[in-house]
Amino acid sequence: MIVYENRIESSFHAVDLAVMDILGALNTKCPHISKQRLFKINFMLRELLNNAVEHGNGFNVEKEVYCLVEYDSNSLRFEISDEGSGIDMKAQSADRGIKTRNRGYETISAMDFTYTIQENTVYVTFDLDKEE
């Protein structure tokens, strides 16, 4: 089931509004999701949407960020894409200095999200069957 789907402008204010909409939709459509998990989802969404606005679209309000949130009985799936050129994670992981720029991805991994990056799109999965 699609919980949320929208294109937002490239601003932190638009990210804030989108995250509030997504969390509201999750509270309505998936009321069994705990407050602890909603906190993690809030952090992950802000991190990735802000990255798309800042690094992907360079704060260009002419460019949009696409966000899709889907729910099934045991997981949430998120798709976030921007209009930037994308990132090459293999090339970046070869550069030891990049570690300071990927803290957000390390943090969301530590919060039990799995993600893949393909060019300018990040796909994230949150397994709701995992114990908290």
Image: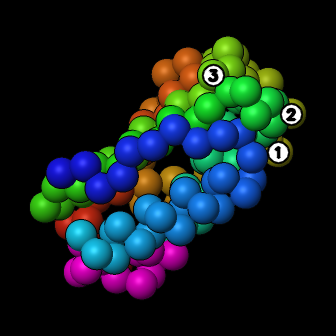
The residue type indicated by label 3 comes to Glu
Crowd tier of the residue under label 1, counting other residues whose Cα lies within 10 Å: few below 14, some 14–19, many 20 or above: few
Tell which residue pokes out farthest to the front in this image: 62
* Coloring applied to the structure: rainbow
Pointers 3 and 2 in contact (CB under 8 A)? no
Q: Quadrant of residue 90?
A: top right
Q: Which residue is mark 3?
A: 83
Circle 1 — which element? helix
Q: Which mark is residue 97?
A: 2
Residue 3: tell me if it is visible: yes
Q: Which residue is mark 1?
A: 100
Magenta residues, as a range? 30-39
Residue 40 rendering spot, x and y as whole percentages: 50, 69
Residue 108: tell me if it is visible: no
Front-most of residues 72 and 105: 72
Q: Earlier in the sequence, mark 1 or mark 3?
A: 3
Foreground: disc 3 or disc 2: 3
Pointers 2 and 1 in contact (CB under 8 A)? yes
**Does the magenta portion include 67?**
no
Residue 80 rendering spot, x and y as whole percentages: 50, 38
Q: Quadrant of residue 93?
A: top right
The residue type indicated by label 2 comes to Gly
Relative to 40, does residue 47 appear above or below in the rendering? above
Residue at (53, 31) in percent of width and height: 81
For residue 96, side relative to residue 3 (left or right)? right
Residue at (75, 46) in percent of width and height: 11
Crowd tier of the residue under label 3, counting other residues whose Cα lies within 10 Å: few below 14, some 14–19, many 20 or above: some
Residue at (61, 47) in percent of width and height: 48
Relative to 118, does residue 44 appear above or below in the rendering? below
The residue type indicated by label 1 comes to Thr
